[in-house]
Amino acid sequence: MAITTFDLPDLGEGLADAEIVTWHVKEGDKIETGDPLAAVETAKAVVDVPSPYTGSIAKLYAKEGDVVDVHTPLVDFEVEGEGDSKSAKSKPAAKKAEKKSEEVREDSGTVVGAMPASSEDLEQEHIIRRKPKGGNGRPKAAPTARAKAKELGVDLSQVAATGHRGQITAADVEKHAATGPSAAPSQTKMPPPAPSATAKPVNYGKAEPIRGPRRAMVQSMTQSRDLVMPTSLFDDADIHYWQPGQDITARIVRALVAGCRAEPCLNAWFDGEAMTRTIHKHVDLALAVDTPDGLIVPVMRGVDTMNGDILRHELNRVKIATRERTVNPQDMQNPTITLSNFGMMAGRYASPVIVPPQVTIVGTGGIRHDVVPVMGGIETHKRIPLSLTFDHRAVTGGEACRFLAAMIKDLQHPF
């Protein structure tokens, strides 16, 4: 037997650390290659880290709730093999070491997908969301589902999963609590009031570390403050003549695409140091979504190529994945433009913050009934408030105005 140390890998996001949400193993447990070690929360998502070895867990270097730096020890494995721990550690990387003059450690790769499993490399998406083989029998559940199960006294092993790739969701737990065998008669007679969508425990008067999506927000907002010259425009789109059955969000996305076609330079990246601008052909739209854990921004690729039905399907998929924190890290990278639909909660106008290297963010306020002048009198019309923030280093005022005008024109079309 040899002791081999596995370091926390870079999960493909270029982030410096991750928080241990749940250990799927404990010291002394047997584990096989590919079985989940732990669920960790980065600034963008909750992902599973799989085992690169078959053996026993000798030591866990962190507790649940701890923040672990990338490339620092996470787990010690006791594995079958000859020689001491050094030879056991370097053996999986032997083939790669032949190609490089420098020393290679298999557990220090910057991309999770580069970690070898058996004789082949695993792709990043399989590393991150690989289905457990069932070695330790721990149910696969979102953090929100585990919290709900603890609150309702539900055994997760008895809950039927309906989430992404067999994950138990908070809704699954609530359904099981209401209809399953664990539901006590008193619970069925008088269920507790449902908390709001953003309800979380609050520790008043206690300084707490900023983690997960909130840490990402601090970093991106600081970067925006330092690197962007923001300017905002505000206007309203009259939707009084819309035909029945219009999908508001899909129409807003369609209008944003119309704006990008009218002025492509707003669907771009800008590098102030290199003094370069990259205008993108396709619209990869970031959607700013408010969650109890903070702001999460998934990306919908190529919305300019989608018709209404496909767009609605993708919007629903992204909404569910964001709520359950199952969005893959690669699905939150490299957007070309951002939409913030803050008006679903409150607010008419805002100055949304651009995250570089993007140069544009569009915000939509709550739909209002406004009194508008018409020929011979006044009428009450439904209108959508629009807020456009652009980086004035890369976009002129005229370009921004024409973009916003194209959006308004598309939104005011009856269908």
Image: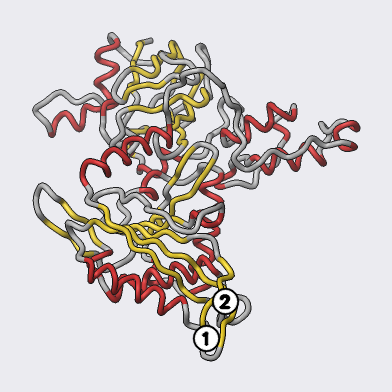
Q: Residue 389 versus residue 308: which sits nearer the camera?
A: 389
Q: Which amino acid does label 1 sit on?
A: Val
Q: Position of residue 309 (x, y in %)?
A: 53, 72
C-alpha span from label 1 to label 2: 10 Å
Crowding near the residue tagged with mark 1, few <14, some 14–19, many ≥20 C-alpha atoms within 10 Å: few
Residue at image location 87% in from the left, 37% down from the top: 188
**Left or right of 207 in this view: 201:** right
Residue at image location 50% in from the left, 19% down from the top: 64
**Left or right of 342 in this view: 397:** left
Residue at image location 57% in from the left, 76% down from the top: 381
Crowding near the residue tagged with mark 2, few <14, some 14–19, many ≥20 C-alpha atoms within 10 Å: some
Residue pointed to by mark 2: 381
Compared with 334, 127 (above or below) is: above
Tell me the element at label 1. Answer: strand
Residue at image location 40% in from the left, 68% down from the top: 235
**Left or right of 59 in this view: 197:** right
